[in-house]
Image (tube, rainbow, N blue to C red):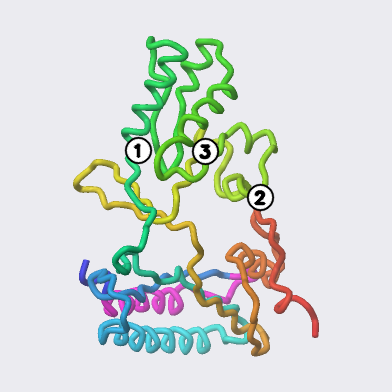
Amino acid sequence: FNLKTSPFINKEINRLALQFLEYGAFGTRSCPDMLAITYYAGNYRGNMHKEYTREIQDTYYQLDKDLEQLLDKIDKKVGLSNTLIVFTGSGYYKSEEEYPDGMLLTNGEFHPKRCVALLNMYLMAIYGQHTSWVKGFYNNQIYLNRKAIEDAKLDLTVIQEKAAEFLREFSGVQFVATENVLRTGNWNEKTSKYLHGTHISSRGDLIIELQPGWTINNDDPKAKVKVIRNNAVITPLVFMGNGIKPEHIYREVKATEVAPTVTHVLRIRPPNASLSLPLRELTTKK
C-alpha cells in the first residue's frame, strides 16, 4: 500500500510505458496507436489531509519529472507534432471535513442489507410469502426476482412502482428511478444520467440516489465504507500536440466532451452512447 501511494509507483508505471514506446512500434502503422497511462498524485499512505504537505509537494515534483521523461521519449520516437496528448484527472477532495459546532449536517449511513430485507417483507405482505421477491443490492441498484414475478403472473411495472414508493421513505434516500421509466423513454433531465450511465441488459429494477454526505455501510467489518458524492469535482483538462494552438478555455467542460473530441481528431466515430459534441475550441477553424 505504501508503494502505491508514493512517487515511486509513478516511476514504475513510467518505466513500463517507456518500454512500450521503445519496443511496441508505436506510430509505425497505418492506424493510430493509443497509450493510456494512469498516475497517482494523492497523499502518501492515503492520508486525507488536504494541506500541501511536503509529501504531496514531492509527489507532484517527481510526477513532473516523469511526465518530462515520457514526453521526451514520445518526441524522439514518434514526434509530438504527430501525437495527440490528453491530460486529465479524477480530482481531489477530503472526505472527512471538520465543521463548526452547532452546524446542522444531513448525513448518515445507508444499510443495503436492511433495505433489501425490509423491501422483501413489504412485497411479501402484498404478494404472498411463498417466495423471495428481491434478489439483492449492487452498485446502488436493487434487483427484483423477475422469475418469481413472471411465474406469479404479476405486472413487473406495478411492482417496481410500489417498491420505489416504499424506498423513497427511507432515511437518506434522495431519489429512486425505476427501470421501466428508463426503458420506456419516460425519463427526464433528472433520470437521464441513469439512462446513459447504465446498460439495459444489466441495470437493476430500481436505482437509488442517496443524499450528499451519506455513506453505504454493507455491515461487513472488512469492507470499506463507500462515500456518496453527487457534486462534481473540478479537475484539469489539457489537450496538446497534433498542431493544437495554445489557448485557454474559460467555460465549463464536461467529461462527456472528451471522448468525442479525441475521436474527432482521430477521424473515427465517437462511442455509441456519446451525445456530446467535440470541443468547439479544438474543432472550429479560426
Q: Is residue 25 left or right of residue 284?
A: left
Q: Which residue carries the number 1 mark?
A: 112
Please tell me in which quadrant of the rendered image residue 258 appears: bottom right
Residue 242, given in percent of the width and then of the height, sits at 64, 82
Above or below, 121 against 224 in this view is above
SS of the residue under disc 3: loop
Residue that protrudes farthest toward the right in the picture: 286
Q: Front-most of 42 and 119?
A: 119
Q: CA distance from mark 3 to mark 1?
A: 17 Å
Depth check, mark 3 against mark 1: the one in front is: 1
Q: Which residue type carries mark 1? A: Pro
Q: Which residue type carries mark 2? A: Glu
Above or below, 34 against 148 in this view is below
What number is the disc on residue 189? Answer: 2
Depth check, mark 3 against mark 2: the one in front is: 2
Identified at 58% across, 65% down, the residue is 255
Quadrant holding the C terminus? bottom right
Q: Which of the marked residues, 1 or 2, is nearer the chain's N terminus? A: 1
Q: Front-most of 5 and 56?
A: 56
Q: Which residue type carries mark 3? A: Arg
Above or below, 263 against 242 in this view is above
Identified at 38% across, 11% down, the residue is 129
Magenta-drawn stretch, dominant element (helix, strand or loop): helix
- Which region is colored magenta? 6-32
- Graded by Cα atoms within 10 Å as few (under 14), some (14 to 19) or many (20 or more), the crowding at tag 1 reads many
Q: Which residue carries the number 3 mark?
A: 203
SS of the residue under disc 2: loop
Q: CA distance from mark 3 to mark 2?
A: 19 Å
Identified at 52% across, 30% down, the residue is 165
Q: CA distance from mark 1 to mark 2?
A: 26 Å
Please tell me in which quadrant of the rendered image residue 254 appears: bottom right
SS of the residue under disc 1: helix
